[in-house]
């Protein structure tokens, strides 16, 4: 494998990172909205977001990407692969992060909300200043775990023709006929992205376990 | 124990809290039945009764941490309904201290005390900090202002919680068993803080089984059982001549040396 091929893999890596970042950032915004609606106490909102979460947790990511890509095209909306997978990953991450953060919001002791209410804080201040800072801390290990899944999951975007790291590996391997070497390198690149995150996640989890003992 | 001179007769005749025929239901369970209670400005009430008798429920209805279903609650002239406006108006008047302190663990002591004045009263940071420092000084814990709640003892945390509530300048303070989660050696520092507050004329409703405190500061002791007010009397009468059998039984249990 020459320098040119390796640089091509790095271009794929760049798109993998970009897609992960978009999915995670937009998914965080969506997930926050979903978590807040899911814990709002408003029946209709709770049902709606509950259904959304169930739908996206109950179907494979691959199928979700297909539906966004081909489904929207059938509906007359022709999106580039890049936009389509970004939307797909955002919807997917919104559901998972929404569910993780719902759990974390509910894990903040009730007394916290009650104290905030008794101090005459409104909903926005109660959430922003009291509940969410604690919920985010509680959710960090699970959130990081999901981010790792998301990074690895971006490899599915290759199916709809988006050239991220896995697809770049496929292309190079077809050119130089050294699949083991190429996918070995691709694997190492994934590992270098995911492993430090996993380590950080379990570090936080341990620290959290000690703090709440 | 001697009664402080400043504590005698501080109550006015102006009604601060009025509960009229209040009922509270949890599903099919009636937690409060026909509660009638008027608390005058400056009055100190001690509320006692067996576990599950509805003491917490009663005071939590006053600041709408729990909604009530029948009757009427008025606080300082505002009729408490289920609308945000009346709830907010009532909570402006009412501070609350909880059994488990409920300090915000991710904020320092000072930040705990500054948050609500800045958000709910829209005070500037400087003004909020000055208020907070003043009240932390009053509960004699100013030197801990920059620590986090977890770094303080239970007694210190509860005093911070009292200061935090006072930063909102309430006219009434509700206490829900403020000392029952504390180690015995820390009970006194919290009770002393409450006694000082009573001495300054604060209207207070205290759920507590500290009968020494009741004797010393209460204008009236109220005994509840099964969601109803069974008996109410000034502490002297309450402890020496309880009228109801249930009260006598309760006092017998609670005053028996452990
Ligand atoms: N959220 C709730 N849902 C259903 N029932 C409740 C709820 N909160 C309290 N109750 C019930 O209402 C009754 C009164 O409860 P409350 O907490 O007011 O009692 P309490 O006098 O404060 O008791 P304790 O001394 O144990 O604190 C109890 O029987 C309790 O089981
Ligand atoms: Mg109680």
Image (cartoon, rainbow, N blue to C red):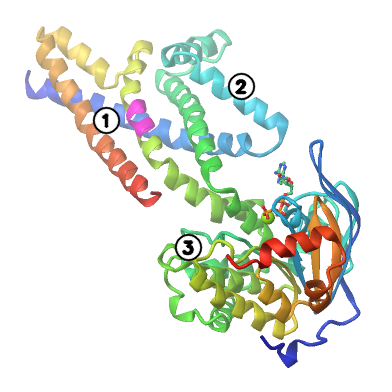
Q: Which element carries disc 2, helix, strand or loop? A: helix
Instruction: Establish whether labels 3 and 2 are both on one chain.
Output: no
Q: Of helix, strand and loop, which mostly describes the magenta segment?
A: helix
Q: Residues within 10 Å of mark 1 (few under 14, many from 20)?
A: some
Q: Residue lying farthest left?
A: A2
- Coordinates of residue B64 in the picture (x, y in percent): 76, 55
* Disc 1 versus disc 3: nearer the observer: 3
For the residues bearing labels 1 and 3, Cβ distance under 8 angstroms? no
**Which residue is rendered at x = 81% and y = 85% of the image?**
B10
Where residue A181 appears, as percent x and y from the top left, is: 9, 15
Neighbor class of circle 2 (other Cα within 10 Å; few <14, some 14-19, many 20+) is: few
Q: Which mark is first along the chain, 1 or 2? A: 1
Q: Is residue B30 a member of the stretch shown in magenta? A: no
Occupied quadrant, residue A178: top left
Task: Please check whether the numbered discs 1 and 3 fall on a single chain.
Answer: no
Identify the residue under disc 1. A14
Using residue A68 as the reference point, say whether residue B204 is left or right of it: right
Residue B75 in view in this figure: no
The label shown at residue B107 is 3
Q: Which residue is mark 2?
A: A51
Q: Position of residue A132 (x, y in %)?
A: 52, 48
Query: Which chain contains the residue that carries disc 2?
Result: A
Q: Nearer the viewer, mark 3 or mark 2?
A: 3
The magenta region covers A145-150
Which mark is nearer the camera, 2 or 1? 2
């Amino acid at each position: 494998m020459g320098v040119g091929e390796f640089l091509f893999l790095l271009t794929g890596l760049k798109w993998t990172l970009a897609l992960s970042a978009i999915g995670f950032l937009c998914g965080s915004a969506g997930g926050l909205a979903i978590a807040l609606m899911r814990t709002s106490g408003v029946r209709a909102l709770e049902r709606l977001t509950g259904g959304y979460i169930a739908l996206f947790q109950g179907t494979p990511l691959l199928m979700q990407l297909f539906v966004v890509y081909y489904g929207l095209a059938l509906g007359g909306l022709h999106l580039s692969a890049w936009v389509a997978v970004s939307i797909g990953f955002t919807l997917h991450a919104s559901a998972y992060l929404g569910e993780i953060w719902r759990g974390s919001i509910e894990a903040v002791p009730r007394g916290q909300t009650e104290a905030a209410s008794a101090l005459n804080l409104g909903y926005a201040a109660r959430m922003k200043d009291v509940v969410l800072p604690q919920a985010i801390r509680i959710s960090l290990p699970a959130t990081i775990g999901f981010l790792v899944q998301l990074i690895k999951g971006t490899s599915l975007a290759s199916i709809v023709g988006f050239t991220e790291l896995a697809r770049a590996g496929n292309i190079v391997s077809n050119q130089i006929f050294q699949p083991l070497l190429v996918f070995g390198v691709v694997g190492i690149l994934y590992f270098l992205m995911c492993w430090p995150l996993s380590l950080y996640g379990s570090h936080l989890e341990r620290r959290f376990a000690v703090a709440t003992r | 124990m001697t009664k402080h001179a400043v504590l005698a007769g501080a109550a006015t005749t102006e009604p601060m809290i009025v509960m009229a025929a209040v009922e509270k239901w949890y599903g099919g369970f009636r937690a409060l039945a026909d509660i009638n209670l008027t608390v005058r400005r400056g009055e100190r009430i001690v509320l006692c009764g067996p576990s599950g008798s509805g003491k917490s429920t009663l005071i939590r209805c006053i600041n709408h941490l729990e909604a009530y279903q029948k009757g009427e609650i008025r606080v300082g002239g505002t009729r408490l309904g289920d609308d945000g406006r009346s709830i907010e108006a009532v909570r402006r008047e009412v501070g609350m201290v909880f059994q488990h302190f409920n300090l915000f663990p991710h904020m320092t002591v000072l930040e705990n005390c500054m948050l609500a004045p800045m958000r709910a009263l829209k005070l500037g940071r400087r003004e909020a900090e000055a208020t907070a420092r003043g009240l932390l000084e009053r509960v004699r814990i100013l030197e801990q202002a920059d620590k986090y709640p977890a770094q303080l003892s239970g007694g210190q945390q509860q005093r911070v919680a009292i200061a935090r509530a006072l930063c909102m300048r309430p006219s009434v303070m509700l206490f829900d068993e403020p000392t029952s989660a504390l180690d015995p050696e820390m009970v006194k520092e919290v009770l002393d803080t409450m006694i000082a507050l009573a001495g300054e004329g604060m209207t207070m409703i205290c759920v507590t089984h500290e009968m020494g405190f009741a004797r010393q500061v209460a204008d009236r002791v109220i005994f509840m059982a099964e969601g109803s007010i069974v008996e109410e009397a000034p502490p002297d009468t309450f402890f020496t001549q309880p009228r109801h059998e249930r009260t006598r039984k309760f006092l017998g249990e609670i005053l028996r040396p452990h």
